[in-house]
Image (tube, rainbow, N blue to C red):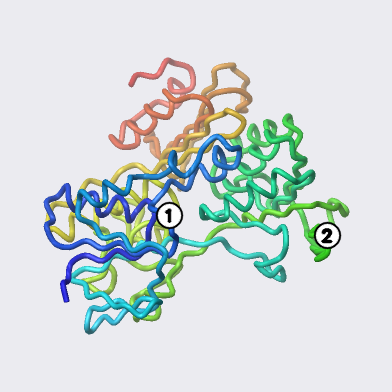
Amino acid sequence: MNRGVVVLGGGQAACQLVASLRQMKYDGTLTMIGDEHALPYQRPPLSKGFLKGEADIASISLRTAEFYQKIGCEMRMGVRAVSINRESQIVELENGDSLGYECLVLATGARPKTYPGLPIETKNLHYLRTLAHAGQLSESLSKAKKLAIIGAGYVGMEVAASARQLGVEVSIFETAPRVMLRSVGPQLASIIQDIHTRHGVRLNLSAEIKEIKHDALKGSFTIVTGTHGTDDFDLLVIGIGAQANTELAVGAGIGCGYGILVDASCRTSDPAVFAIGDCSEQNHPIYGPGFRLESVQNAVDQAKCAAAAIVGGPQPPPSVPWFWSDQYGHRVQVAGLPRHHDVCVIREQTANEGALTNAGSVWYLKDRKVVSVETLDAPKDFMVGRSYIKNNTEVDAERLAKEELLA
């Protein structure tokens, strides 16, 4: 049995890993196993351009089939791994095949959290994570008049923006008092709320959902709340977060928490097994244990770390976490994590004291160092902020608020 590196998962992290291994001169066999039929693709466009018909599978694919052939990576897509035998270092597949490995990399990603009491096969109920999900939702949106979204995180807000641009009436139900509670601070959240309201989205915040009734014959929904009354919808999207796919690791006795536990080089409790991307929970060199980040940048960074460890090379330096979102043509960009900040500074292109009301940025400082920056249509602020965080640059809060930024 020819053993090399076997990657379980077919997303951004898996694609970056095999590319990085070849760039780092790894000359062993490479095999990627993914339960989706498509080659690795970008997930962020699924809630934006893909839903609006502005992108297709060709435009969101990360690499062509020829790329994987060129680097000698065997692609086994549309097949699911069912178990890992760590003692013999073998992966068993659903179709009865088995593969031996020298190093195993778990890039199994995450899946949407389901809403209690609503069977996943319920007619006109949608989650958004995969290409298949996006295709089904896109088709449903083309026929829908009223859409309800539960959850006001990145997915919920981006789907809302896409649906409104397609002419669908949208209502969002969020149990928190504001949108994007876990993603951005209150200043930026407030302006994002205003943007959605101006585009006709009905925001039901601090919503207490009593019941969701489903008419199986019509495929419609009635949402009953204790705070915002009752309303009917012909389409429902659930966007209440994601949970890491840890089942294979748990079944193999590999250490797991909320995700698969890994060290700074993305190695699990088994030295022959690594975990990268949305399925992992890292003891991060900067942010410490319990670090889980569902983002393209984190998937890419962890893939590079794991590849370096596999080939015995030096670990790449930690990078600054960053995220982005596009809504109604506005670009939201976030760098760093605003943990334990002591000063908040607002910079905007149209000055309005004490609040962000136009294009600009919100800066979070700790001991005169930038720990995070959130921007709206302000790419220079975002790039400079990332640089300040990376270089641990000391800044003066008053000057930051008023003076031109120096790159």
Instruction: Report x, y in % for residue 164.
Output: 70, 36
Could you tell me which secondary element the residue under label 2 belongs to? Answer: loop
Q: Which amino acid type is marked by label 1?
A: Ala
Task: Pick whichever, 358 or 403, lies toward us.
Answer: 358
- Residue that badge 2 annotates: 218
Q: Residue 38: which disc?
A: 1
On-image quarter of the N terminus: bottom left
Q: Quick one: which residue is furthest to the bottom in this view?
A: 87
Q: Residues within 10 Å of mark 2 (few under 14, many from 20)?
A: few
Residue at image point 46% right, 37% down = 334
Instruction: Report x, y in % for residue 84.
Output: 32, 78
Instruction: Report x, y in % for residue 126.
Output: 65, 57
Q: Is residue 280 visible?
A: no
Q: Which amino acid type is marked by label 2?
A: Lys
> How many numbered marks appear?
2
Q: Is residue 121 visible?
A: yes
Specify which label sits upstream in the sequence, 1 or 2.
1
Task: Pick whichever, 1 or 232, lies toward us.
Answer: 1
Residue at image point 44% right, 16% down = 403
The answer to whether residue 304 is above or below residue 125 is above
Q: Quarter of the image holding residue 282?
A: bottom left
Question: CA–CA distance between discs 1 and 2?
Answer: 32 Å
Residue at image point 56% right, 50% down = 182
Could you tell me which secondary element the residue under label 1 belongs to? Answer: loop
